[in-house]
Amino acid sequence: MRTPPIGVTAYGVYLPIWRLQRKDIGAALGSGGGHGSRSAAADDEDSTSMGVEAGRAALGRAGRASGIVFATATAAYADKSNAAIVHAALGLDRSVSAYDFVGASRSGVGAIVAAADAGAAGRPTLAVLSDVRTGMPSSADEREGGDGAAALLFGTGDDVVAALIGHGSASAEFLDRWRIPGESSSKLWEERFAEGAYLELAKEAVDGALKAAGLTMADIDRVAVGGLHRRAVKAFAKSLSREAAAHSVDPQAPFLLVDDLSDTIGATGTAQPGILLATALDEAAPEETILIVNLADGADALVFEATASLPAFRENRTAKSVSEQVTGGRTVDYQRYLTWRGYLRREAPRRPDPDRPAAPPSARNADWKFGLAASRCRSCGTRHMPAIRVCRHCHSVDQMDRERVADERGTIATYQADLLAYTLSPPLIGAAVNFAGGGRLMCEVTDADASTLKIGDEVEMTFRRLYTTGDGVHNYFWKARPVGRATDADKEA
């Protein structure tokens, strides 16, 4: 009897729209620049909000996960669960478990393995990997890092689009990079020290994964190598190519090397294994084998085999591919980027600081605040935003059904750009958004240019951080963003 495949049944990636051009760093500081760009989370984005967007891209509107695991090295909260926020924003049932893998970039592969094990046991589980990579101005981390998120849903059966057929791992303790809690950037040991350790560990991990899969390097069609130690990443990719060429029918092209996106996005840390796998799956044909190698305080290797279900998944998904998001960037100037990251402090707007969101009403209205679920009157059909108990139209009481609005599109009925309101990215754009299914939402508009925005523009909803209070409470809610995000031709002024 054929054993049903175990592996990825859905996947999605989220890349922020903003790109920091590396030459702008050199122009401003006289050093630390380079060619290409890196992705940059906006001031209203963090690892949690980006994880939500990746999770939405993977799950679509189905919400089939029975558990989620959230991995990041740049958690928005310690002690408090970030996975619970992702869970709420995805609108998942209360019975769906939500756990955090927080603290090191290697936690991304840990979440993938945990989700795969749970999926194999009959519990479809979503691994959400997300990171905001920061570094001191002019540092290699600032230049080579990148921000982004990926989500992989693991399960079994005919829905599997990429079967996980091999996993190898090698762990060792050595001092490569470190960051104590509360600091915004890592410190690095001299990079030549760790390179040798990574090359040795990576070979052990790959050998283990290939053995588990019953393959050799000559059988691998696509290879992706990721990690924050860029020197080791490049060296190991070359060594794999040499090994495969020695046994390949075509030594000139032993396998396709998946673009690690270092020239356009940068190294995205915890999220990178998921983003690289999604990049490979966006192009792979059925039965192609994919090797993912990740270097982070050790090494991990995963071997996937694309299935016949992959083309249909790509054709039917509504989320954008990795390449579409890579090319859909918009440039942010270096000064604004430094402000977003807290390295350039500017005078705050001369308005009172925003209040801390109160815990009791936030909990009572979690379906609305985090899940953007409106209420529709059973008696007259009127939809209300926010959700209420008494219908404004027919005055029926407690005759409401909840409806998730987060996945619907709307149009801008009216808007204004406010230069005095509290925001790190003025002006704050406030708008009234009408939805085709009924209801009007007053909200902020993000990733938009106030000078080109128009009444009637179509918008979609995105989960963002409104602000963070002085005592560290993040106030999350939904914002609208223009559909069809701007290309690089639309430069930031």
Image (cartoon, grey):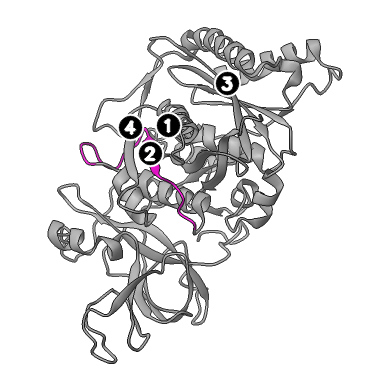
Relative to residue 342, is residue 347 depicted above or below? below
**The residue stretch that appears in magenta:** 62-80
Q: Crowding near pointer 4: few (<14 within 10 Å), some, many (20+)?
A: many
**Of pointers 4 and 2, the one earlier in the residue sequence:** 2
Q: Nearer the viewer, mark 1 or mark 4?
A: 1
Q: Crowding near pointer 3: few (<14 within 10 Å), some, many (20+)?
A: many
**Of pointers 1 and 4, the one earlier in the residue sequence:** 4
Observer able to see residue 380: yes
Residue 307: image tag = none
Q: What residue type is labelled 2?
A: Phe
Residue indicated by mark 4? 102
The secondary structure making up most of the magenta span is: loop
Q: Which of marks 2 and 3 is in front?
A: 2
Residue indicated by mark 3? 233
Quadrant in the rendering for residue 416: bottom left
* Disc 4 and disc 2 in contact, CB within 8 angstroms: yes
* Disc 2 and disc 3 in contact, CB within 8 angstroms: no
Quarter the N terminus occupies: top right
Question: Regarding mark 2 in the picture, which secondary structure is present there?
Answer: strand
Q: How far apart are marks 4 and 2 (CA)?
A: 8 Å
Between residues 260 and 460, which one lies in front from this camera angle? 460
Q: How far apart are marks 3 and 1 (CA)?
A: 21 Å
Residue indicated by mark 1? 111
Q: Which amino acid does label 1 sit on?
A: Ala
